[in-house]
Amino acid sequence: MSEKKCNLEQAEFYVNDLFDYLEIKGNNQSLFNEFCKLLMKYSEDTVKKSWNDIIYSCELPNGQMAGRLPKMREIQNILFKSIII
């Protein structure tokens, strides 16, 4: 039985939530789209399981600058490790 992949609506919800949390604003549509595409490669359960680790790997905003996402490769590794566990 194959697991249901994360759909676009779910991926956008996660990415919007993270961008709001990190106060990432402005013209970041390509980053947003790339992040959504990455999440949609994995199952809903994998994304849910790894979401806390993804959030904890981000740099928080400091009042002057927005927070920062880790490199996509690091996010992909977190997601991949959640499949194995």
Image (tube, grey):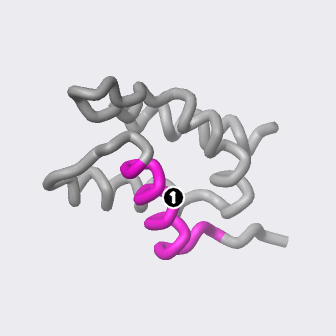
Q: Residue furthest front?
A: 63
Q: Amino acid at mark 1?
A: Tyr
* Residue in view at x 35 percent, y 30 percent: 61
**Magenta-span inclusion, residue 61:** no
Q: Residues within 10 Å of mark 1 (few under 14, many from 20)?
A: some
Closest to the observer, 62 or 74: 62
* Residue in view at x 70 percent, y 72 percent: 4
Q: Residue furthest left?
A: 27
Q: Is residue 42 left or right of residue 24?
A: right
Spot occupied by residue 35 in the image (x, y as percentages of width and height)? 39, 53
Q: Is residue 74 left or right of residue 82?
A: left
Q: Main secondary structure of the magenta part?
A: helix
Q: Which residues are magenta?
A: 5-20
Spot occupied by residue 56 in the image (x, y as percentages of width and height)? 56, 29
* Residue in view at x 33 percent, y 55 percent: 34
Answer above or below: position of 51 versus 56.
below
The N terminus: image quadrant: bottom right
Give the residue number, with chain letter if any, for mark 1: 14
The C terminus: image quadrant: top right
Answer above or below: position of 41 versus 68.
below
Total marks in image: 1
* Residue in view at x 67 percent, y 63 percent: 44
Answer above or below: position of 64 versus 21.
above
Q: Is residue 59 left or right of residue 63?
A: right
Task: Kindly indicate the quadrant of the structure image that contains residue 29.
Answer: bottom left
In the structure shown, which secondary structural element does the residue marked by tag 1 occupy?
helix
Q: Is residue 24 left or right of residue 43?
A: left
